[in-house]
Image (cartoon, rainbow, N blue to C red):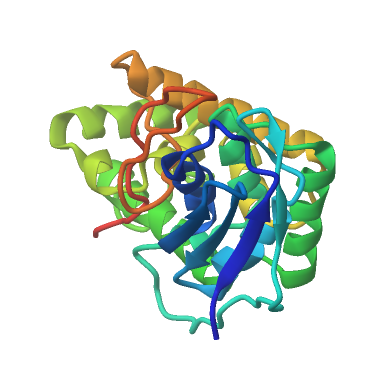
Amino acid sequence: MPHSVHVSGIAPTTTEAHLNDFFTFCGKIEKIDFDTTAHTATIHFEKSSAAKTALMLNGGTLDANTLNVTSDTEHEDEKHTDEAVHHIEQSDKPRAGIAAEYLARGYTLSDGILQRAIEIDTKQGISKRFLSYLTTVDTTIGNKALGPDQTVSGKVVETVTAATQQVRSVDEQKGYSKTAGDYYSKALASSFGGKVREFYTTTSKQVLDIHEEAKRISAEQKGTAAGGTGTGTGTGETPITVSPPVAGAPVPSAGVKS
């Protein structure tokens, strides 16, 4: 069964690269059939869940034009086992998290689309694969930075601030964050770690929560671009560059290696 969506309302200035950048946030793209005369395109994804996320973006804005995203197929999320996960793909992430990444990179999504993302998460639940991954990030970095059986978000440390400083210190010495889901590991160890964990592990969100997460991601991206300790969003498998909205920093892989 094809995992594709049809896109119309594309601006005359939009290129195939722009479409790729925009829809890459949904998941891995296999190919794009772009009709530059009719200003329409068919985006073919590797997974059904990515196509389902793309449909959520109907009414989104690219190059100042409102996109119509439709499909003749009813796409569903993949079923995953409960094994420990050390790597996730973009399509595994909660839709609200993906929406926050779009906002952080300068794209315009209406509050209606953000609400749609929340509703999908509420209906589908946060995938066990993503929850397992987030737990792996927490324990992997916690074990290496703080000691056995400790997590960066846990209450076993005296203060969250102390944990954050320790994680950063170990990162600088041994470069653990270079092989981890940087954004998630440092976000969990930050002063707002509890809010980050709640955002990505529960479905009880509001549109404002997505905007707040977008601000956190954007702050990390700016830190990266400035040569600081920021770590990007952790989206996708390969670096991508968003065209018109923001000439942002490359986006690192979200894999964790123990």
Above or below, comparing residue 127 to residue 113 in the picture: below
**So how many labels did they put on this image?**
0
Above or below, comparing residue 135 to residue 223 in the picture: below
Q: Quadrant of the C terminus?
A: bottom left
Report x, y in % for residue 209: 74, 37
Report x, y in % for residue 237: 33, 53
> Outermost residue toward the front?
37
Report x, y in % for residue 127: 60, 69
Q: Quadrant of the N terminus?
A: bottom right
Residue at image location 39% in from the left, 19% down from the top? 223
Residue at image location 70% in from the left, 56% down from the top? 69
Q: In terms of depth relative to the viewer, which is nearer, 104 or 15?
A: 15
Is residue 17 rendered to the left or right of residue 71? left
Is residue 97 rendered to the left or right of residue 183? right
Q: In terms of depth relative to the viewer, which is nearer, 149 or 243?
A: 243
Residue at image location 53% in from the left, 61% down from the top? 43
Report x, y in % for residue 206: 82, 43
Q: In terms of depth relative to the viewer, which is nearer, 143 or 85?
A: 85
Above or below, comparing residue 74 to residue 43 in the picture: below
> Outermost residue toward the top?
226
